[in-house]
Amino acid sequence: MPTPEKEAVVAEVAEQLQQANSIFLTDFTGLNVQELGELRKSFREVQVKYRVVKNTLTKLSAKEAGCDDLVEYFIGPTGLAFGMDDPAAPAKVIRDFAKKNDKLKVRACLFEGVLFGEERVAELADLPSREGVLGQLVGVLQAPVSNLAFSLNGILSKLVYALDAVKEQKES
């Protein structure tokens, strides 16, 4: 029998599933409370939401949010990492945490609407952040303008040197 609390959890998780740019399903079997606390802290530092919800409620949430592809991965203890701003941030945290503790496993990942298996998480972790990509784009866009300004400055300075030489020649 559905209770109001369970319905609220299903609605909240469904909303997070719809809003997230990326969703990582992790298996945290074998992690103790302290290790799980460290993982949660690492996620919070990069503004990633990490939740552990009963699989039955999570399946209902996934169906409600239109993420039916994820339903088959909700077996056993499952933690959900929601990447809201930077879709690659959860992958980076998982990769860094897995270096210290090999008990954390990734079952699947829904990244920008595309479902990936655990083998692709390392590739996603190597993606630059949104700010990094924007910085590279600004650099690429700025280079031609900078080169034009440098070239025009060179032409003007040569003109000034030529006029100065002409002036000195006429004075002597």
Image (cartoon, rainbow, N blue to C red):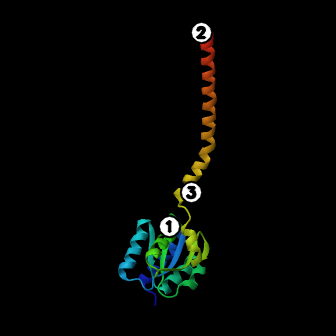
Spot the residue most to the bottom.
1
Question: Mark 2 sits on what residue?
Answer: 171
**Residue 97 screen position, x and y as percent:** 45, 74
**Above or below 115: residue 141:** above
* Residue type, mark 1 in image: Ala
Which numbered disc flags the more N-terminal residue, 1 or 3?
1
Residue visible at 59% across and 52% down in the picture: 137
Question: Mark 1 sits on what residue?
Answer: 89
Q: Is residue 73 visible?
A: yes
> Secondary structure beneath disc 2?
helix
Q: Quadrant of residue 44?
A: bottom left
Q: Quadrant of residue 153?
A: top right
**Residue 134 screen position, x and y as percent:** 56, 54
> Secondary structure beneath disc 3?
helix
Label pair 1/2, CB-CB below 8 angstroms: no
* Residue type, mark 3 in image: Val
* Residue type, mark 2 in image: Glu
Q: Which quadrant is home to the C terminus?
A: top right
Spot the residue most to the front.
172
Q: What separation in Å lies between label 1 and label 2 (alpha carbons)? A: 69 Å
Question: Mark 3 sits on what residue?
Answer: 133
